[in-house]
Amino acid sequence: MEDLKWTATAPIKAAWQAMPFAPGIYKIYLRGALPKTASWPSELTPLKRGDLLYVGKATNLRTRAKHHGVQTSKSTLRRSLAALLGLQAQWHGKSAHPRLTDVDEEILNAWMVANLGMSFAVVAELEPVAGLEDSMREELCPPLNRDARTPEQLHVSATAATAHRNALRDKG
């Protein structure tokens, strides 16, 4: 991990645009605050400005950025944030995951652009990317990674699972 050359943390939209077509690792930080209505119980460690929220890997950083930027059904990060923010998911077509309503997609996009930052590191060879991500997630325990290592991660997983079940129930 020490050999990685991380970019400076930038607003998420600027970071997405700067990401190259290359394999790598990325970290997402809270630059603003969760809304007061977010599902974050007081007994959990509070999330504050500057906190690491999520660590991810990509075989192609630029392509992965597109998933986080527009497609809730293809992004665990977006689905977790949507659930925490209480946004309404619904099923469309044969997708394996629900999508947000168009209005809620816009709300989530605007919130992410206003409140998240990102840094990334290009990894010269694709092979070590998965191992790097695993070791970073184990060491740093970001709360929006659903690794079941911390009460915060368990809460995010449970909140997202409830939103998923509700979307499935409403599909009927």
Image: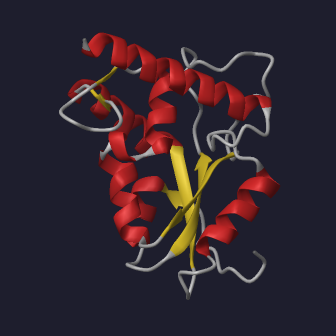
Question: Seen from this angle, which residue lies furthest left?
Answer: 93
Q: Is residue 165 visible?
A: yes
Q: Position of residue 29 (x, y in %)?
A: 61, 49
Q: Position of residue 30 (x, y in %)?
A: 61, 43
Give the residue displayed 22% in from the left and 36% down from the top. Answer: 94
Q: Dividing the image into 4 quarters, which one contains the C terminus?
A: top left
Give the residue displayed 60% in from the left and 73% down from the top. Answer: 129
- In the image, residue 109 above or below residue 26: above
In terms of depth relative to the viewer, which is nearer, 75 or 30?
75
In terms of depth relative to the viewer, which is nearer, 71 or 31?
71
Q: Position of residue 10 (x, y in %)?
A: 53, 61
In terms of depth relative to the viewer, which is nearer, 73 or 105?
73
Say left or right for 31 vs 151. left
Residue 20: name its quadrant: bottom left
Say left or right for 99 vs 111. left
Give the residue displayed 30% in from the left and 47% down from the top. Answer: 70
Say left or right for 153 vs 62. right
Q: Position of residue 151 (x, y in %)?
A: 78, 29
Question: Seen from this angle, which residue lies furthest bottom?
Answer: 124
Q: Dividing the image into 4 quarters, which one contains the N terminus?
A: bottom right
- In the image, residue 128 above or below residue 37: below
Say left or right for 4 vs 36. right
In terms of depth relative to the viewer, which is nearer, 127 or 103?
127
Residue 155: name its quadrant: top right
Q: Is residue 84 visible?
A: no
- In the image, residue 33 above or below residue 171: below
Give the residue displayed 45% in from the left and 63% down from the top. Answer: 15
- In the image, residue 32 above or below residue 122: above
